[in-house]
Amino acid sequence: MGEQVTTSRGDVVAYDRLGEGPTVVLVAGAGSLRGDARVVRTTELLAAAGVTAVVPDRLGRGSSAAEGTLDLDRELEALRAVVDANGGTAVLCGHSSGCSISLHAAAAGLPVAGLVLWEAPLAAPAARVADWVEGLEQRIDAGELEAAQEWYMRDMPPEWLAGAKASPAWPAIYAGVVALRADAQSLGWATEQLESGGLRDAVTVPVLATYGSSTQASMVEAADRVRRVLPRTEVREVAGAHHTWEPDAFAPVLATFTRACLPG
């Protein structure tokens, strides 16, 4: 619990670790997983099942303070440092855009033994995603942070954006949009690689693509898209709603998959 590691680029990444056994690293998407009650419960269940659960703060979030351009390459070095500090090989469990970051990590040669994808948002046409990525980066670079956050959320259910803007935390939310550059870049990369089929040869580890029992149709479509491109993919529905999982249902699935990828 409460550990740190320094990356090859000098960034300090904070993370929690619980349990002993094969390692799974939970990779957050646009939000934060560290400290979330469902994630804490999930890590407790994983630890009880003989798995080491590692939950880092992404760069520029929580206790992983970082300045400058938080791009995908820098994010991968942060993830590499976390894996290296926790046994040297791990299963990655991505949430939302954390799925595309995890896919990129595996394709880039990080020591990844398997991938679990929770509701990967990878169903959109690659050209549309590329335009969205460009628009986001332009707004971030121009310092138009509120507009950038609205742009990032433009294809999400409208009630999500309305709820965020109604929250007193909205200024803090859009101030943090600078940390979403890596998410957008990874989504652009992953959708293009899935559409072209290039991901087939780049990712050879086992993949478990999951989605909640109550979810958007696009999440199911995305899981099927991953399965069509990556032959070692299993697709599974798991109890969950509102883009997140039920810990008592998901933790056993994640533990079993991790132990299968990292036996002994």
Image (cartoon, helix red, strand yellow):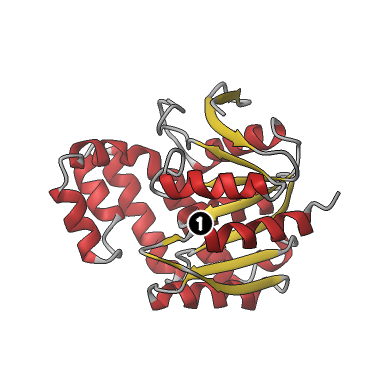
Report the residue at 71% width, 55% height from top.
258
Residue 61 pos. (x, y %):
40, 34
Question: Does residue 28 appear in the picture of this structure?
Answer: no
- 235 left or right of 128 in image: right
Quarter of the image with the N terminus is: top right
Above or below, 142 against 112 in this view is above
Name the residue carrying label 1.
247
Q: Secondary structure at mark 1?
A: helix
Determine the residue located farthest toward the front in the rendered image: 48
Type of the residue with mark 1: Pro
Residue 52 lies, in percent from the top left, at 68, 42
Which residue occupies the foreground of this view, 127 or 71? Answer: 71
The image quadrant that residue 132 belongs to is bottom left
> Residue 83: percent from the left, percent from the top?
68, 37
Query: Badge 1 local density, few (<14 within 10 Å), some, or many (20+)?
Result: many
Q: Is residue 27 above or below residue 81?
A: below
Instruction: Pinpoint residue 180: horizontal percent, then vertical percent.
Output: 39, 44
Where on the picture, by quarter, is residue 152? bottom left
Q: Nearer the viewer, residue 184 or 23?
A: 23
Q: Residue at x 40, y 25 (%)?
A: 67
